Amino acid sequence: MRAVLCTTCERPRLATAASNVQESLISVSTSPNTEWQCKSCTVVNQGSSILCEVCERPRLATCPPAASLLSSLGSLSESGAKPCRDSAGVSLPQSLQQTPTPSIKDQPQRGIKPQPKPRINLEMRTQKMMRDEGLNLIGQIRVDHEAEKRGVSPEEVYAAICMCGGSNPCDWLTSELPHLLDEICAMVASVQLNYKAGGSGIQPEVEKDGGEAEQGTLNLTGGGEKLSRAEAKLAWLAAGGDTERAVRQLLRDRQLKELHSLGFRDVLQCEEALCQSGGEVRGALSLLQRPLLEQFHQRIWADQQEPPIDPKQPDKQRMCRRLLALYDLPSWGRCELVLALLQEPDVSYSLEVVVQAVKESLDKDFIRRLLNNECPCCLCIFPRSKMQSLTSCQCSVCHDCFRQHFTIAVRDKHIRDMVCPVCSGPDINDPELMDSYFSTMDIQLRICLESDVYDLFHKKLTEQALMKDPKFLWCYHWEPQHQDLSCEQFQQWKRENDPEYQRQGLAGYLRDNGINCL
């Protein structure tokens, strides 16, 4: 590119002498935004421009004769320097103006007048550009016409052009597209396998619509469906032939499909949740469920009391959900069985009793037998869980009757009267049977009897065992002074305080030590 201004005085290349320049400066307006007229071609140019838009002459250049203009154009060289008319300096050569260094053949030799290079015609350049664009358009029209004959859509042609380079797009679609679709399916399958194995997926670098590159982690829950070529082709066409974007779109579609199967139909909401979770379906599911569970969380953490479960509530689904959450039932069917038993006419079952019976069995008739047991003592109906069975027999009584019977027997009766209230068994006179009976009865009485009654039972049981021991000596404590004293202590006290004993002792002492009078 040729220098326009002098590097020393900063005057234009075709400027006249200093006197002419001063005269021209007087005639030119001082404002830089004022329009000026070229003195060579008389075209009015904008005030901000330095060169004429038509003849490309400087703003301050005078109108030269036609012959001198042609000679001046012929004497200029692309690589030479132009001397300035008003200064002794010379404009810097083109090599010092940060331009490419010309070859040795292009440099003019000394003493030989350099030949000027033809200037680039802007109109020819524009015509060439238009011709190239026209040929390209004609080629595309021919390709579209051929694709239309073969039944290929314009989207497929566009995507194939982006992938095939300079080859025929239709031929590329026939020969290479199936292999590319198989490769896309394999990439998607590898991501699914990586996620199943605990990996975080692939991280393809995909260009956004604005041209920027984004790097995203693709996570999938490992769907079992195998990707088909038709799905891969649709994603590839939607991505405009970009394989990485097609894989990413396929994985995102699978994620949206899984969220849709879980009940979330809003596509925009699902996509936003996936973006916030980094492409992980579990995180997106947590974000989508959070607003739905907000009311549930507020009710859980509230201080208000849980309302009771009413079996007559018309909303059966709600009652089953509450039973499943509060009573840890193993299945939805057992919740429905609990409601069915509670809704039967003329029943007085409590909810806890029915739930416990349903946990033990699924047979409705068997559950009814568990819930309807008659106590032989009070003749009331109780569930099996409210009945107490004795280990020595098959009789069962309710808890209240069991506790009252043995409480009265311990307080007011002999230890041998602590038998079954229904069948009066077993025979406690048998020592072996008595030991076995009371060893198991002790566990049951410890739970149902009061502490003082239970201690009295143990005391009577101990006395009964001691009475049967032949080596056990029994003292009745027949005198008041014997209370709270052992037999030895009482005997010592009696010796010291009994008058009869003292009289006998004095007589014995006198007999042993006294003097016999003559």
Image (cartoon, rainbow, N blue to C red):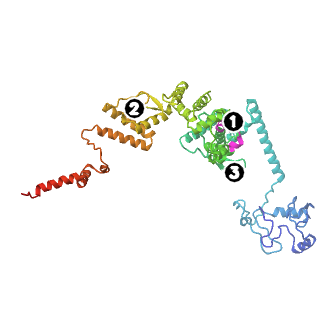
- Find numbered disc 2 in the image and state the secondary structure of the residue it sits on: loop
Read off the residue under disc 1.
Answer: 234
Tell me which label, 2 or 3, sits earlier in the chain.
3
Identify residue type, mark 3.
Glu
Of marks 1 and 3, which one's residue comes earlier in the chain? Answer: 3
SS category of the residue bearing label 3: loop
Q: Which residues are magenta?
A: 257-271
> Seen in the image, is 394 located left or right of residue 513?
right
Q: Residue 177 got which mark?
A: none
Say which residue label 3 marks. Answer: 212
Circles 1, 2 touching at the beta carbon (< 8 Å): no
Q: What percent of the width, then of the height, locates residue 379?
A: 51, 28
Give me the C-alpha separation between circle 2 and circle 3.
92 Å
Residue 7 in picture, x, y percent from top left: 77, 70
* Dot 3 alpha-carbon crowd within 10 angstroms: few under 14, some 14 to 19, many 20 or more: few
Residue at (83%, 53%) from the top-left corner? 122
- In the image, farthest residue toward the left: 518
Question: Closer to the camera, 463 or 360?
Answer: 463
Residue at 37% from the left image edge and 41% from the top image edge: 458
Label 2 belongs to which residue?
A: 419
